[in-house]
Image (tube, rainbow, N blue to C red):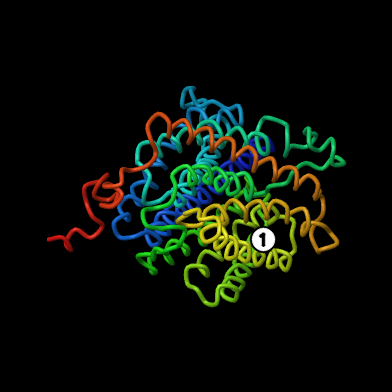
Amino acid sequence: MDNAALSVGLQQLTNSGNVLFLLLGSILVFSMHAGFAFLEVGSVRKKSQVNALVKIITDWGFSTIVYFLIGFPLAYGISFLRPAAELLGSNQGFDIIHFFFLLTFAACIPAIISGGIAERAKFWPQSIAGAILVAFAYPIFESFVWGKNSLLGQPGCWLSGITGGIPFHDYAGSVVVHSIGGWMALPAIIILGPRLKRYVNGESFGIKVSNIPLLALGSWLLCVGWFGFNVVSAGQLSSISGLVAVNSLMAMVGGIITALIVSKNDVTFIHNGALAGLIAVCSGSDVMHPLGALIVGGIAAFIFVKLFYVETEIFKIDDVLGVWPLHGVAGTWGGIACGIFGMKMFGGLGGVSLLAQIIGSLAAVIFALLSGWIVYTILNKTMGLRLSEHDEFMGPDLSIHNIEAYPEESL
């Protein structure tokens, strides 16, 4: 074999390895959507379990279509409205599999929001809202950090001009995915209002979860898939980092142990504490020391446990799965924490700017709140977001899907 043929063969092998790498990561993150589904199923009442399952899988379907046609091209300037031969190209279809991987991130937006507005939202307005956010709002911010619009995260971007040449760093989406999703959910939760009898005459009446084993299953599925979420954000096989994997592990453990202590052994907080840690470490998982990641995850779980109480018991905001403190605030903390624990003085690799992290993280909060408020306000004025009192009392399983989660119990 001559040198030219050897070079071509090695390049094909590299291309194939990168495609396989992204495919395996896509499958892992895709499995996280089952985690979202079962976490919500276990956290709502029996009369809302079917609705939770249907929402997550149909939102995935709508997200796939709109992100393929609009969102991914908007964020990265790559259109797939070309012949299949061009999509395959000379790199084994890397762009199209890259779309699949980033789709699994984009589809997290309606999945996150779903948990906050559970049990009282109409089906079609929420589906439409999710499709709009995935098609337009989410990819616009995505483009600012990872994509074609040089604003926050690209070398030489606008932000780096005021931060000493260092752009905003969000390796795997603490801010781009989780903070955006959690802060977009907050206007929808407030506009919908609390579930029936959640608060009566200013007094809080807690609504119990329906199924702890299913809730725990959802948490475990998310934890396992998260290693695809973070590690495969490298984008290609040659850039894979064992540090990212171990930092993800340590942040998850930090979240578990902290939630165990702070919540005084509450099973729901412990399983969500693991997720809080993983959410917070996404941004800096490639630059932190494992002990730094442990601390970041622990602080995220502390934030979630304490802020969930403030949100639901003091502010009287009925956020069913606590998606605002879990994804929104813990995600914002993760973006800022990257600028702290990524520094060499804390054992990190350096190359991060705390100022850039604060600006980028706060920009996401403002963008997400405005986007969520605009979309959900318009839909509420035109279609109405909330089920009727009768339908909510009956439960969305019967009023929307005409079946219960356990049909044999009604025989």
The single residue placed furthest to the top in the displayed view is: 82
Looking at the rendering, in which quadrant would you find the N terminus? top right
Question: In percent of the image, x 55 and y 29: which residue is there?
Answer: 89
Left or right of 343? Residue 64 is left
Quarter of the image for residue 288 reads bottom right
Q: Which residue is mark 1?
A: 242
318 is higher (above) or lower (below) than 168: below
259 is higher (above) or lower (below) than 200: below
Q: Position of residue 411 (x, y in %)?
A: 12, 61
- Disc 1 is placed on an element classified as helix
Residue 41 in sight: yes
The single residue placed furthest to the left in the displayed view is: 411
Q: Position of residue 396 (x, y in %)?
A: 30, 49
**In front: 181, or 9?**
181
Question: In percent of the image, x 44 and y 37: which residue is there?
Answer: 64
Residue type of the residue flagged with mark 1: Gly
**In front: 149, or 330?**
330
Question: In percent of the image, x 49 and y 59: which residue is there?
Answer: 222
Question: In percent of the image, x 67 and y 60: which residue is there?
Answer: 242
Quarter of the image for residue 279 reads bottom right
**In front: 46, or 4?**
46
Left or right of 138? Residue 209 is left
Residue 1 in sight: no
Q: How many marks?
A: 1
